[in-house]
């Protein structure tokens, strides 16, 4: 057990070191790809707080991701940059507020209702931006000038620079990881685990589980908002797709792939998922059919096989290979 | 809004609601009986619509296309149940959602490979192509009345099968206590397979009859699926009666949301925000009765 932890810690240190040094040797394409992966990792971690730790299967997590992106787009002035130090907390607060409103309604349901209701409310938001003229309708809206992080005369980083965006994403990922780690080891985190295992028992022990679940939903939504803000900054555009259920399902798959109920797992899952997507998208033409154009076919087939064959994610499969007997 | 416009919208709302009932009742039955949440259910609505379009073109008759299309969807449903869905019985809802979501992607791409990504129209069959004149300018298409009548007929047939036949007794018993039914010598697996295929066929059939009025387009199944989720949350999961009441409610609210003009304090609410009305209805029901109007108390 001790040795296992040491090995794991060594691996984590190596990965962090490689990630920190990546922009020094990698091409622009890969720097941007890994920035995107890290942003998705933040989103996947935030969903795992609900899915893996509290047992709330949210099928509408993209809503909170997109909400922060749209908040930035609406806050940003027509010409000139928004202020990073005000627009960032405001956008995350918008996601948290939305999570509070939706959570207040959905947390009172459970099981399959929770799945359907979270999806339905996320779709409501999707249609709000898709059907109306708010923020460019179905085409989305460009954030022409990236937020500026200038404080007085000093500018710690510039979000116009793709390397800086990369390091901001890396820093955010590290902070979110540490925050969740502390949170889950706190009494609050233990209550969430208790709710997952047996909510009635927690209730009879005197814990107001509704409030705990709602708080968890809001924290998760706020962290998804961090990812959404960074994504909007990275690409300089927000569109209804950021709120769509395709994204919600993809994030769920990232969490499942990497393994639920761990913090590193969803991050690994996010990387696997994004690389897989890229791999299928760049498939060559075969027999007169452009396979790359129909990448979703392969993605769908992969999801079907993965849910049948890897119920505990890649991490679970790995563990099972190593200790075939303990897995009872 | 004058009386005739109101009447027309009322008929439209009822017709949309009945169509929703065909799709959502399959979804709710499959969940109520097998405990499986199938998010690919809406894909069969799309498959049905595309089958209606392509078969009506091939066979040169909408009336021939209907039975052939239903037979095809039943076949697809049986195949899916045997290959994949039966592996989901008793598993966590999370995995049911994910696997069937994977199926949506597969179906969308197969549709794109087979039929392309264009929007198509299906011609209303000749016999039903007339319109009933109401006033000098307003008419009502016979085809829409026919949709309502057919949906009502199918709904009545369904209730009859579930309540009055031996097979329906097996369905009801199988959902209440699976082990007991099995120990009485009834093969519940076959009952499940039949129910799943029937649910799929209902969705496919709804897509076929809707094709001439709604046009046929990519992603149409997902739109319907999410509205069906709203219907089921309002009506209560597993309840056919709830699905009926909620379908009509959603159909009417959605239809009138698009034609009523509502302004509060200069802020235009309807029809600008009409795509959100049914979700607000759902939110209200959740606050009032989290288990749905006809859902079992949990």
Image (cartoon, helix red, strand yellow):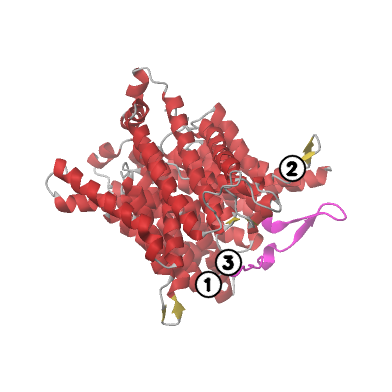
Residue identified by numbered label 1: B115
Indicate which label's residue lies in the foreground, 3 or 2.
Answer: 2
Q: Judge if badges 1 and 2 mark residues of a common chain.
A: yes
Neighbour class for label 1 at 10 Å: few (<14), some, many (≥20)? Answer: some
Q: Position of residue A132 (x, y in %)?
A: 69, 50
Q: Report the span colored magenta.
A: B118-144
Residue A131 part of the magenta segment: no
Q: Would residue B23 be seen by someone viewing this image from the given angle?
A: no
Residue B132 part of the magenta segment: yes
Q: Judge if badges 1 and 3 mark residues of a common chain.
A: yes
Subunit under mark 3 = B
Q: Position of residue A97 (x, y in %)?
A: 56, 35
Q: In which quarter of the image is residue A206?
A: top left
Q: Is mark 1 on a helix, strand or loop?
A: helix
Quarter of the figure that contains the C terminus of chain A: top left
Residue identified by numbered label 3: B63
Q: Would residue A298 be seen by someone viewing this image from the given angle?
A: yes
Relative depth, front residue between B122 and A83: A83
Relative depth, front residue between B30 and A319: A319
Q: Position of residue B180 (x, y in %)?
A: 26, 36
Would residue B38 appear left or right of A81 to someone viewing this image?
left
Q: What element carries label 3?
A: helix
Relative depth, front residue between B227 and A45: A45
In the picture, the disc for residue B270 is 2
Q: Is mark 2 on a helix, strand or loop?
A: strand
Neighbour class for label 3 at 10 Å: few (<14), some, many (≥20)? Answer: few
């Amino acid at each position: 057990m001790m040795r296992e932890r040491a090995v794991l810690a060594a691996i984590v240190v190596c990965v962090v070191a490689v990630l920190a040094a990546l922009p020094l040797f990698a091409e622009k394409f890969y720097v941007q790809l890994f920035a995107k992966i890290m942003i998705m990792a933040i989103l996947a971690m935030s969903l795992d707080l609900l899915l893996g730790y509290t047992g709330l299967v949210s099928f509408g997590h993209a809503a909170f991701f997109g909400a922060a992106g749209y908040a930035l787009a609406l806050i940003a002035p027509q010409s000139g940059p928004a202020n990073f130090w005000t627009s960032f907390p405001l956008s995350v607060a918008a996601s948290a507020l939305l999570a509070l409103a939706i959570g207040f309604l959905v947390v009172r349901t459970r099981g399959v209702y929770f799945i359907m209701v979270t999806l339905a409310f996320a779709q409501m938001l999707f249609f709000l931006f898709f059907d109306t003229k708010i923020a460019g309708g179905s085409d989305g809206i460009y954030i022409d000038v990236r937020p500026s992080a200038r404080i007085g005369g000093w500018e710690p980083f510039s979000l116009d620079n793709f390397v800086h965006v990369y390091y901001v994403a890396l820093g955010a990922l590290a902070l979110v990881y540490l925050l969740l780690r502390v949170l889950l080891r706190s009494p609050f985190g233990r209550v969430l685990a208790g709710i997952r295992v047996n909510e009635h028992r927690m209730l009879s022990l005197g814990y107001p589980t509704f409030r705990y679940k709602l708080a968890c939903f809001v924290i998760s939504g706020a962290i998804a908002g961090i990812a959404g803000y960074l994504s909007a900054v990275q690409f300089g555009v927000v569109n209804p797709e950021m709120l769509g259920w395709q994204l919600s399902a993809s994030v769920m798959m990232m969490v499942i792939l990497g393994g639920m109920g761990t913090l590193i797992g969803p991050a690994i899952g996010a990387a696997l998922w994004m690389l897989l997507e890229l791999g299928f998208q760049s498939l060559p033409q075969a027999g007169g059919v452009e396979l790359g154009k129909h990448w979703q076919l392969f993605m769908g087939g992969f999801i079907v096989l993965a849910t049948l064959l890897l119920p505990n994610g890649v991490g679970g499969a790995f563990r099972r290979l190593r200790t075939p007997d303990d897995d009872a | 809004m004058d009386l005739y416009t109101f009447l027309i919208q009322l008929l439209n709302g009822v017709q949309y609601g009945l169509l929703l009932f065909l799709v959502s009742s399959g979804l709710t039955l499959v969940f109520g009986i097998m405990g499986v949440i199938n998010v690919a259910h809406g894909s069969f609505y799309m498959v049905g619509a595309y089958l209606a379009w392509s078969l009506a073109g091939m066979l040169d008759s909408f009336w021939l296309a209907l039975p052939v299309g239903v037979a095809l969807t039943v076949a697809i449903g049986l195949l899916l149940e045997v290959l994949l869905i039966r592996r989901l019985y008793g598993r966590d809802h999370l995995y049911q959602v994910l696997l069937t979501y994977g199926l949506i992607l597969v179906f969308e791409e197969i549709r794109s490979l087979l039929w392309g990504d264009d929007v198509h129209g299906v011609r209303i069959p000749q016999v039903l192509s007339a319109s009933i004149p109401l006033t000098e300018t307003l008419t009502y298409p016979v085809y829409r009345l026919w949709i309502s009548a057919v949906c009502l007929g199918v709904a009545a047939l369904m209730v009859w099968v579930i309540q009055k036949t031996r097979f329906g007794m097996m369905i009801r018993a199988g959902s209440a206590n699976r082990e007991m039914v099995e120990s009485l010598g009834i093969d519940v697996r076959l009952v499940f397979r039949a129910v799943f295929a029937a649910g799929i066929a209902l969705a496919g059939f709804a897509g076929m009859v809707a094709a001439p009025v709604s046009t046929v387009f990519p992603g149409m199944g997902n739109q319907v699926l999410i509205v069906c989720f709203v219907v089921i949350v309002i009506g209560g999961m597993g309840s056919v009666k709830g699905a009926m009441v909620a379908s009509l409610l959603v159909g009417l609210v959605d239809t009138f949301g698009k034609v009523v003009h509502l302004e509060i304090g200069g802020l235009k609410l309807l029809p600008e925000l009409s795509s959100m009305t049914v979700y607000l209805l759902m939110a209200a029901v959740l606050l009032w009765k989290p288990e749905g109007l006809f859902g079992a108390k949990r």
